[in-house]
Image (cartoon, grey):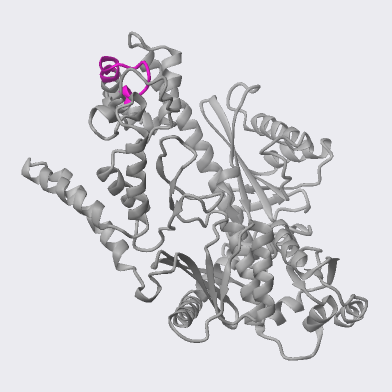
């Protein structure tokens, strides 16, 4: 095989492009870019010494493809696009849920709100991120305690003010721009003070909070005074992170890289307004042996994921050619000029060394745990693919039915991608055509609806699973497999019988019984148990909703419309149950009397049992 690959390498052009390494099943396991494709790909298959990670990846390559680009910058961007598409095992993958909290001031509003967000779309109006030792919500609470800015989403028209303030305004938590109690200029001054505080000028807000804490204590409101003291402690944490030599630096990210034998890691230190706001580590089975190439690829992937680009990037170990490449990358993708600093001496070099040290400590302390996790997720998927004799398993969908004596039958669909739950893609189904406790028929209805959505490419259902898993034995398997054949789909189906953990599949003639320690079995068990949990919770929620609705409808003045407004305002039954009378009174049309009646009804013993 290696000789065949070496011969194919000789046909590659000496131009820029992207290469895709594939394993024996045709699965893309690594994507890389190159200024000169032939030289770069050749390095994987020559006889020179390579690190362990590169040798491991190269030993799994059975073929490769390549795409030519007009420039190295185009290759740079295409590489990241293909990494997102194929999610190769040996590329650094930033998880979508790896997000940090920021404080965001929305200047597009006439009277801006200040809020915590996790997935910013640009750097405008952002302060943070708040990573280590600081809680963004505590900082936001401190701001609201010192400045009575609005928190509602209401559109404010100064020409048509509301007749009365909401509860927040009445108790002094909001300055009341909706009733013209405060002018635009006065409100803007509060926003300026908040921005100054978030930029490091803390004396003004500390003074305001200290005065408020003292007033609470003098009036024997010790709980409120203690809350203010906690907020002052959060502000002190902000002050303690100042790096004296970088106090003039508006914002910068510092990068470090360490490569171990089997694992490597990147460390990112975020500096905002001269403060170290936190550091994060990103592990990878990356194959790049050169620190220069590894760092450049990671930096591009990192910012395409976070979308928040600082004014300055500090990184040691990259050459002038890659500095120019990164600058062009930021201008093309973010329309932003970024200063790339490669320090040789001084504080910034020490910060880079600190990042590298942190990355090294992370690798040494986490290597066993991360490699074990890799075996339980992607490794388990590879074992399952071999077991079913299919090219790849990257998406598993698990289904389960839940009912009590055949009533309120529901089904769950859970999704595992790369061996881990993808909870945003979970779906719920109310069984519509089946009467009584008929799990076979309920499964058939559920899969018919789900696969019809797939064939129609309906939003939220357009991705085809590699494997469908259901709880049960041969009966459940036959109920589903025939349906998939009728619809002309090529999807492996598995049923997992809980008693003996026997695996029945459409790809094997006999049940499979794996050792309890087998990673593929453990993955299937996790999917099955998660589908069961999700179905039971949905069934419980429907019972709670039904009980809550019947109790509230017994109140005079409460109908379906008011109940819909409660759900719209509080989102969930838990939100409704934990709301105070004052919280309920914030909803338009809910007076204090009705709100108190609703609250009392919610907390009667019968409703408590539902909750």
Q: Please state the horizontal and vertical placement of residue 351, each as a whole percent of the image.
A: 45, 78
Residue nearer the viewer, 578 or 352: 352
Question: Is-magenta flag for residue 399?
Answer: no
Q: Please state the horizontal and vertical placement of residue 203, each as a whole percent of the image.
A: 24, 57
Q: Is residue 515 visible?
A: no
Q: Is residue 83 left or right of residue 277?
A: right
Residue nearer the viewer, 319 or 295: 319
Q: Please state the horizontal and vertical placement of residue 358, each as a whole percent of the image.
A: 46, 77
Q: Is residue 365 left or right of residue 558?
A: right
Residue sitting farthest toward the bottom: 48
User: Which quadrant does the N terminus fall into?
Assistant: bottom right
User: Which quadrant does the C terminus fall into?
Assistant: top left
101, above or below 166, in the image: below
Q: Is residue 439 visible?
A: yes
167, above or below 524, in the image: above
The residue that appears at 50% across and 42% down in the rendered structure is: 533
Q: Please state the horizontal and vertical placement of residue 493, each as a whole percent of the image.
A: 72, 47
* Residue range highlighted in magenta: 584-597
The residue that appears at 69% across and 56% down in the rendered structure is: 394
The residue that appears at 11% across and 44% down in the rendered structure is: 215
């Amino acid at each position: 095989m290696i000789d065949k690959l070496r011969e194919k390498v000789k046909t590659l052009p000496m131009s820029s492009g992207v290469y895709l390494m594939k394993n024996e099943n045709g699965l893309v396991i690594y994507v890389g870019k190159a200024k000169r494709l032939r030289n770069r790909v050749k390095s994987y298959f020559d006889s020179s010494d390579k690190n362990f990670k590169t040798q491991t990846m190269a030993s799994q390559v059975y073929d490769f493809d390549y795409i030519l680009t007009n420039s190295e910058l185009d290759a740079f961007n295409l590489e990241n696009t293909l990494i997102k598409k194929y999610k190769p095992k040996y590329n650094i993958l930033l998880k979508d849920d790896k997000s940090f909290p920021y404080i965001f001031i929305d200047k597009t509003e006439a009277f801006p709100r200040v809020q915590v967000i996790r997935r910013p779309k640009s750097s405008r109006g952002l302060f943070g991120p708040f990573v280590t030792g600081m809680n963004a919500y505590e900082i936001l609470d401190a701001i609201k305690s010192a400045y009575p800015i609005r928190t509602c989403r209401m559109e404010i028209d100064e020409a048509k003010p509301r007749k009365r303030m909401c509860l927040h305004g009445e108790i002094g938590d909001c300055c009341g721009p909706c009733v013209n109690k405060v002018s635009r200029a006065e409100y803007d001054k509060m926003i300026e003070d908040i921005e100054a505080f978030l930029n490091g000028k803390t004396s003004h807000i500390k003074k305001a909070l200290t005065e408020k804490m003292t007033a609470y204590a003098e009036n024997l409101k010790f709980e409120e005074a203690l809350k203010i003291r906690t907020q002052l402690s959060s502000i002190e944490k902000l002050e303690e992170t100042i790096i004296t030599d970088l106090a003039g630096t508006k914002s910068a990210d510092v990068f470090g890289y360490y490569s171990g034998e089997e694992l490597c890691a990147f460390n990112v230190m975020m500096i905002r307004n001269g403060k170290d706001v936190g550091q994060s580590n990103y592990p990878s089975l990356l194959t790049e042996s050169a620190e220069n190439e590894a760092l450049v690829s990671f930096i591009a992937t990192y910012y395409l994921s976070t979308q928040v680009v600082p004014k300055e990037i500090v990184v040691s170990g990259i050459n002038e050619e890659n500095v120019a490449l990164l600058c062009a990358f930021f201008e093309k993708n973010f329309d932003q000029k970024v200063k790339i600093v490669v320090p040789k001496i001084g504080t910034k070099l020490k910060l880079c060394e600190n990042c590298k040290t942190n990355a090294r400590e992370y690798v040494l302390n986490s290597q066993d745990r991360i490699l074990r996790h890799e075996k339980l997720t992607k490794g388990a998927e590879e074992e399952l693919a071999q077991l079913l004799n299919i090219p790849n398993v990257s998406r598993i969908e698990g289904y389960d039915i839940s009912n009590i004596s055949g009533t309120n039958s529901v089904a769950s669909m859970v999704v595992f991608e790369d061996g881990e739950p993808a909870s945003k893609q979970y779906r719920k189904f109310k069984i519509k055509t089946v009467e009584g406790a008929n799990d076979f028929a309920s499964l058939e209805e559920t899969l018919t609806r789900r696969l019809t959505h797939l064939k129609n490419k309906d939003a939220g259902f357009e991705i085809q699973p590699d494997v469908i898993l259901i709880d049960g034995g041969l009966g459940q398997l036959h109920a589903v497999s025939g349906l998939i054949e009728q619809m002309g789909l090529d999807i492996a189906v598995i049923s997992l019988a809980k008693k003996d953990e026997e695996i029945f599949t459409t790809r094997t003639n006999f049940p499979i019984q794996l050792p309890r320690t087998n990673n593929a079995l453990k993955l299937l068990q996790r999917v099955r148990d998660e589908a069961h949990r999700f179905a039971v919770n949905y069934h419980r929620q429907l019972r709670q909703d039904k009980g809550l609705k019947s109790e509230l409808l017994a109140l005079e003045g409460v109908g379906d419309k008011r109940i819909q407004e409660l759900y719209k305002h509080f989102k969930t039954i838990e939100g409704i149950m934990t709301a105070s009378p004052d919280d309920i009174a914030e909803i338009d049309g809910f007076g204090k009397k009705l709100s108190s009646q609703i609250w009392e009804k919610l907390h009667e013993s019968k409703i408590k049992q539902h909750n």
